[in-house]
Structures are given as C-alpha cells and as structure tokens.
Image (spheres, coloured by chain):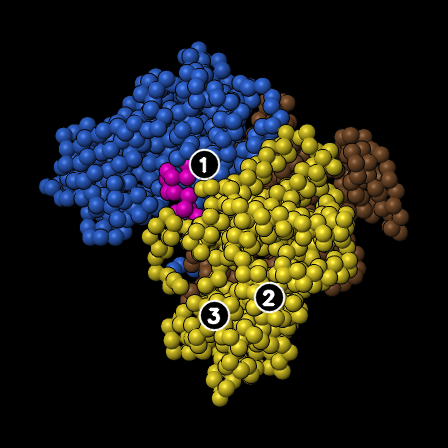
Amino acid sequence: MRNDTRTTLDPDMIDMLRSSLRHVLTDESTRPLADRLADLGWKEVVDTDPATALRTLFEIKGDTLSGADALGPSLASKYSELTGASSASVSIGRPGHLTLVDGSGAENEVSVDEATWAALQAHGRWLVACELVGIGRHVIASAVEYTKDRVQYGKPIGVFQALQHRLASAHAMVVGAGHLITEAGLDGDPWTATVAKCMAGQTAEFACTQAQQCYGAIGFTFEHEFPAYLRRTYTLDRMFGDWRTLEHEIGSRLQATRLVPRIGSL
Amino acid sequence: MSALAADTFATPADYAAALADFLASDPRAQTYVGYRAPSLEHAAEHLRGFQALIFDEGWSRLGWPESAGGLGGDPRFRAAMFQTLWDLDFQIPEPFTTLEILVPVLLVFAPHLADELLPGLLRGDDTWAQAFSEPDAGSDLASLRTRLEPDGDGFRLYGQKVWSTFGHLSRRSVLLARSGGPGHKGLTMVLVDLDQDGADVRPIRAQDGENHFSEIFLDGAYVPRERVIGELGQGWAVAMYMLQWERGAWGWLQQGRFHKRLEQMLAWAPTDERHSASIGHAYTLAAALRLHTRDTVERLAREESLGPEVSIDKLLLIDAETATWNTVREHLGGRLETDPDFHWLFSEYMFSRAAPIYGGSLEIQRTLVAQRVLGMPRD
Amino acid sequence: MDLRFPDEAEAWRAEVRSFLAANLPADWRGLGALDRDEAEIFSNAWRRTLAEHRMIGVTWPVEYGGRGLTKLHQVVLAQEFALAGAPIYRIADTTNIKMLGNTLLAWGTEEQKARYMPGIVSGDATWVQGYSEPEAGSDLAGLKLRAERDGDDWVLNGQKIWTSRGMDGTGVFTLARTDPNASKHRGISFILCELPNPGIEVRPIRTLTGDDEFCEVFYTDARVPVANTIGPIDEGWKVANSLLGLERGEEAATNPIFFRAELDRIVQLARDVGRADDPVIRDRLAWCHTKVEIMRILGYRILTQVLRDGRIGPEASISKLYWSEYHQVATELAIDLLGAQAMVREGRKPFKHFRADEPGAANSTNSWIDVLLMNARSGTVYAGTSQVQRNIIAENILDLPKEPRLERP
C-alpha cells in the first residue's frame, strides 16, 4: 500500500484501521454505519488524517462490496463543515439543489449556492472514486487467484499471456487511479477529484471487464461474487458523471482555459 | 562557479522556483527559450551551450553527489529541474536523458568512473550512448552475442549493437557484452570509447527522417580494465538496476513533456469540442503518470529498490504517451504532419510511436507485471 | 464476390415474404414489443404455424418434414425473417433445430431419424446441449463425463455445465467419454439422453441478470440406450464439429440485420435523450455504423464461402471476434446515453440472452442493462472466447507459429 506513505498515520495504525473497517463494513449488524464506526474510534482517526480515513473507508467499501450507507453521511459531514448546518445524510440533486435527511429519515430539499454545491459534488466524486478503486483492486486480485486454480489444456490458465496481459494492464491502471484518489484527498481540489473520478471509473470498468474475460462463464452467474462487483461498478460510475462524460468535461475545461494544471508537486 | 548547494534550498520546489527565476532573468538562458530543433544534429550542437550554462551556474549539478562533481542533494532536484525546463519551454538537451539512466548505475557499480567522468558528462563536454540490443537480441536481451575478450590489461569487443539512441552523436557508450558462457551469468557491462579504430558507428534514419538510432560495429574496440562497470559477469544485475531508472525516472521526465505539449497544443489550435474527450483522456493518463512517477522519484531518492514494480511506470508511460500524442495530432489537424514549423513536434510525435517498444516492449512489461507483481503462474 | 442472389433464391424470397405477410399480425413490430406472457403465447403459436407451413428446416428432406431446399434458401429465409422482425423459431430451438436436427440428418440412422425428427420439426421436443463441463470449457476435448457400457446401455456418470435453457429440455445431447484410454479427441461419443431420466438431474444457475439461463446437469448412474449414440461410437468429436458450416453461414447473413436494427434503436435513443447533436455521441454512432456495414460485407464473404464450399474456414473466427467486440462497444454507448437513468431499472427485460434484444424492444433501461451485462459481455466468452478466436486467426489464417508448448485439439 504505497500510497499510504502520504499520511500522518503510521503503518501499523493503517493496517489496524483497514482490518477494523473491513470488519465494520461486512458485519451483519443493522445498526447505522455511523454508530459502528464510532465504536472503533473513527472520530479520532478522522481528526488525525481525514483524507486517509475517508479514502480507506471507501476503498474497503468497494473491496468488500459493503452495502452500508457511507456516502450520504459523509456528504452530510462535508455539508456541515461548509455551512454549519447539520443533517444525518445528504444527497446531491440537480445543480444548486441538495436533499437533506434528518435523524428521523425526513427529507428536505434545499437550494445552495454554486460554490457549496460544487464542493459537495467534488467531495462525492472523490469518495465514489475511492470506492471504484477498491473494486478495481479486488477484482484483479480475485481474478489472479482464479487463473492460478483454473486448469485448461493441462495448465493453470494464468500461464497464458492473453490473460496475463489483460490483468497486468488493468493493474497498472488501478495503481494510477490509486495515486489520483490519494492526491485528491490531500489537495482537496475539486479539479483533482474530477480527474480522479474519471480515471477511477474507467479503471474499475476496465478491471472488471478484464477479470470477467478471465472467469469465463462463471463470471456471468450469481454462483460467483464477481457479477455483483461489475454491477456496482456500472452504478458507481454513473454517479456524479460517468467517466466518458468526465473526460469530455475535463477536455472542455482545458480548452476553455488553455491551462493544463500539474496535479501534485515534488 | 556558482554558490549553489543542496542546502541552499529547503525543498526541490524552492529550487525549482529559483531556477525559474534564473531562466527568466538570465539573458544567455533566454536565448534558448522556445528553441525548435530543425534536426537532431542541430539540437545536439545548439543545446550544448545551454547545457554548459546551467552546469556552470550550478543548476544541473544539484541532485548529484559532490564526490562526482555534483552539489549534493537527492534525485528529486533533477526531477524538479526537468519539470521547470519543460514548463518554461526549454528543450531538454538529449544527453540529460541518457545520463539520467546511466549515471545512477555508475554511482553504485563504478563510482571511480562517476568521479572521473560525471562533470564532463553533465556539462555536455562528453556524450554517452547506451548499447544493449543486437540484431538477434531484442526482447530476449540475455541472448546477446557481442564478445568481450581479454587483451593484456583490458578487453576487446567483437560484435554488433543496434538501436543505440543517439549513438552517432556520442563519444562513448555503455555497452553490455558477453564475457563468459551463455545466459545471464556470462554478461558484463562496460564503458567503451566510440572514437577509436575498432568501433564504427552508423546512424539509422528513423521514420521521421531523423537519425534517432545507430548501429555500432565492434571489431576489436579496446576497453581498459577500469572501464568495466561492476564485476565481470555482473552485467545482468547492472542492467536490471539500470532499468529502474530507465523505466522510472524517465517516466517523470516524460510526463513534464506531455503536460507541456498539451498546453502548447491548446494554444496553437482553436477550441473544438469534438476533441474534448480525447484531450481529457490524455490529460487524465498524464496526471496518473505524473503522480505515480513522482512516487518513483521519491522512492529512488530514498534509495529504495523498485524491483519489477517499475514496469508499472512503463505501462502508465505507454498509455499516457500514446494518448497525449494521439490528441496532439488530432487537435492540430493536418498541421503536425505538413507544417514545416512543426517538424520538431512531428519528430517527437513519430518517436512517441515507439513508446510500446523502447526500453522493454509493452508485451514484456505486461508479462513482468503479471508474473512478478501479480504473481500469476509461469509456464 | 457477387452480391446478387440467383433467380430461384429471389423467387423463394417472394414466397417467404408472402408467407410472412399472410401470417404475421398486421401490426407486427417484433417480439420485443410484446410483454413476457404475450411473447410466450405468440412464440408457441408461431412455432406451430411455422411447422404447419414447413418453414422449419427447409433444407431438410421432405420425408423428415423439410422442403429439400438448398442452404441458400435457408439463408434467404433467415434474412427475410430477420428483416420482418419475425422469430425464425423459439429461442429454445437454437440447439434443437440448428444443432441436433442437422446432426441427426448427417449422422443418424434411419431409426434414429424416424424416432426424433418429427418431434424436432413439430416443436414437441426441445433438445438442449450438454458439452461444457466444470473442468472443460475452452478446452472442451478435456471433457470427463464417463459413459460405460453395460449390455445395451451406456451408464453415465459426471457433470455438465452451462447448458442453456436446460430446464426446458425434453432431452439433452451430450458428449461423453466412452474410451478413457484413447487420445484426447478420440474416445468421445455423441449420445442422446431423453428427459426425464432418474439418473439425470438438471439444476438452474442464476445469471447476473437474475435469470435461469444456464443449467448444470448431473449424471449419476444414468442409463441411456447405446442405440442413442449418434454417429460411430468414439467418433463424437468429429460428429459435434461437423456442423458449424450451416449455422455460421446463416449467422453471417442475419447478424448484420439484427445489429442494424439494434443500432437504429440506439440512434433513436440518442434522439430521445436529446443528444443526437452531441459531436462525441455522433462520432460514436458513426463508428458503430461503419462497424455494422463492415459486418454486413464480411457476412456476404462468409456466406459466399459456405455456399460455395459447403463449409466455413477459420474466417468464422474473424466474424465471431468482430461482432462480439462490436456489441460491447455499442451497448456501452446505449448505457451512456441513458446516463444516470441507467441506475434505475424499468421496462421489459429481454428474454433472449445472446446478441441483440428482440426487434421491437423499447429503449427501456431493463432492456439495455441486461443486454450489456449479459448478452454483450458474454459474447466474448461463449462459443469460443476472444482469446481462442485470436489464436485461430493467428495460427490458421496468418500462419503464425503456434503458441509454444501447448496441447491443441
């Protein structure tokens, strides 16, 4: 986990955080995620290094395919940070509009200024990008294991370069996307979040399609965990702009400004 | 000589800012801004003055050890210099790209050579090439056949090398040859003078009309014993160490170029929304390459060993390089290919088509990542 | 390549057209325009109509329910049905007619043909295919289902998988190993197993779109008469591989029609969502258009070859690779056009799990999501993966050296 060199948390702490989050996100409990996170001292971790904490939470959410609602509460925290208004969950509507959900589940649509809305959208893009990267890592690792076990023509199919090259290309993309979500968390810049979401969306889709080709027929059934990852990927990619739309948005903005931001400095 | 030293600057970013000030204010430096090379040979000649200038002023000596004529500091300073030069539209003199790959190897495996030769190399008084591939040893480099035979206190080389980048513009070459039996263990890395009888360098005209590569014919070229890099028979290990610079540090250097070319391309052509997606695609990949190779540079600065992971740098480089130049060509319409003012850029474009081949092909990198990073089985 | 059809084929075309005009409902827009129940009812009734009018297996001899026409006639029929958006038979008949019917006619004994052909023609029988096994997918010849002889019976033990629509089968034609000591491609026999059979259990596998498209078939001391072996014993590999020609020829002629109709739906979708003026979408649509046109020409080429030589060469791999990879790009475009709407499922789900959704299908999210996830994504896996197709193209068309140290069929 090389990206974690850019954090104030020490490596042991991160390992612990990862395994606790894995546990919290996959347990069968019906308690709200926020309560379960509170049990493991989440607030302290977030206060120490919010970027690493949230990135890790969403990466593991992607990795474990957890259905826990982490996005709404995370956007609510961000909204509170920006405006001081508190809510249990926030979802982003059409430009300038948010839906706030209070503790009792009551929904309330509000209009907000452009800057607040854009900041929340960027935050959402970043969090979903982290989840997509978690999915990408997971499906590649699982497909690698499958190609070691699956034997055809008297050999594990992983010896075939056609499959090796698919997974290697996908892995390189996942590594690249991993750097972008890390940087987006650190610089807090909406532009980086958009680029990260764009890269993460195409990466997760590419990783899934390459993995599925390695799985063959079993990858099209609910006998296997894989299809759920594919479906989650397609859904997440569509949130806050799918990767093709974002590529266009990014290119359009570059053409409009004639400036090419260098993300990350030495 | 300047009064610069590594501790003059708190961070590479501070160094970059100071270098930018120098380049913007020094009238000699200003004559090199926006240089567009009419040919590689012209560039080699013209930029020698610029290379000497930034050496004499100390800027290019940061990031190299003092023992070897540098001013100390880690490789991040070199990375910062490349970034600054691209950003301000200076063409990076070709020898820098070669020494960025070769000199780290000398520092580890032949420090006496680094001490002796680095200043001349950094200043541009001396130029080196690298000679690894042979007509029958490309991806399968370990099958190479050029022989290194003992002769008195030294050795003589017999055989043929090919695809030696800028070989015909270089005075010396780092070269991998067979000193022993077959396989990896019989290989030795040496530094050979090309301006001697027994070494014949012939340029190869590449598809853009420029002499990017050379063939080197060796018929008894002499190599003194002290020009052996590492131990006899250690050549493969030396080559592997070199790869992490070739694939890692090179990636950082190139991302600076890609960002700059995208910026220039936007300035040189009117907005066309049809191109937005491909521009966004290239930029996203260039950004990923930038962040990944920044990490690599930092790891190299910490003297970490990168191992097979460095093939990931190359895979990201190939994607970014291919996408960047595809969009440059698309966005400039036919001007890239037809406008004589863009010959220099067209030459870079044509060279970029080799990205999936040079420095270890795309296929080799994918196989390495699959087997040695992901742990997929080998046949 | 002569793109015109001979006069007799054109005369037949007119006949097919008038049959369709007389028998399709007046407002026919395709099976896709019907809901699931209506489609089921229509399909069954239509299948009977086809049988009554001898529109099933027109190349088959008259005594087996056909018309004794040529392969070209069959292709013309398939084209006209595709253009009219009319089903050529029930979906479950793909293996029934194309595969088993033709296999029986080529390899069956008179007794076998007399016994099984009437049910295949009438539609009372539905034969499904039992080839793949858990350990034998791309490497099909590695199959292990054992058939041991006991008197006049085979006793089968083992497992098959990925049997499409196995739950609907009245029988399964299966490849079993009858001589375990023979080399890999020998010692395999082609055996008909009628269902139900107390030794054969069929279990559905739920696909990623939630349908029971595939089945596993378990054989536990299942007894089947040796008389049900099609073709010579131990020659089943040859029997199974002898039939690709006709199927591929027909496919080459009809795929471009189906993919054209699908692309028309995508163009309509672009208009519906207001993105027909978007230059990027237009580029992507134009890309799809050229691919479908190329597919059409490629189809003629393959068709010509099939009709001339009676068989198809490795060129079939080009076609398979081409349409399967095209279809993934085209369906991704459809999903992109749906945008965020694609996160909400609504409308009729496709009931066909390969190639395009049925003609007449609405541009609903359920149609496109399922076609992308299942039909298109599985296209590069079923009937020979893209990796296998590329190897065939490389080795048998380009004459590149074979991959090192690999067993090959």
Q: Secondary structure at mark 2?
A: loop
Indicate whether residue B5 is drawn in magenta: no
**Chain A on-screen colour:** brown
Q: Which mark is residue B1?
A: none
Q: Nearer the viewer, residue A181 or B281?
A: B281
Q: Secondary structure at mark 3?
A: helix
Q: Nearer the viewer, mark 1 or mark 3?
A: 3
Q: Residue at x 47, y 24 (%)?
A: B86
* Residue highlighted by disc 3: C107
**Chain B on-screen colour:** blue
* Span shown in magenta: B355-370
Of the 4 image quadrants, the one containing the C terminus of chain B is bottom left
Chain letter of the residue beneath label 3 in the structure image: C
Q: Which mark is residue B251?
A: 1
Q: Residues within 10 Å of mark 3 (few under 14, many from 20)?
A: some
Report whether residue C377 is seen.
no
Q: Residue at x 47, y 34 (%)?
A: B321
Q: Nearer the viewer, residue B261 or B243?
A: B261
| Distance between mark 1 and mark 2 Cα atoms | 69 Å
**Chain C on-screen colour:** yellow
Amino acid carrying mark 1 in the image: Gly
Chain letter of the residue beneath label 2 in the structure image: C
* Residue highlighted by disc 2: C65
Residue at the extreme bottom of the image, as rendered = C151
Q: Earlier in the sequence, mark 3 or mark 2?
A: 2
| Distance between mark 3 and mark 2 Cα atoms | 17 Å
Residue B74 x/y as whole percent: 44, 35
Amino acid carrying mark 3 in the image: Trp
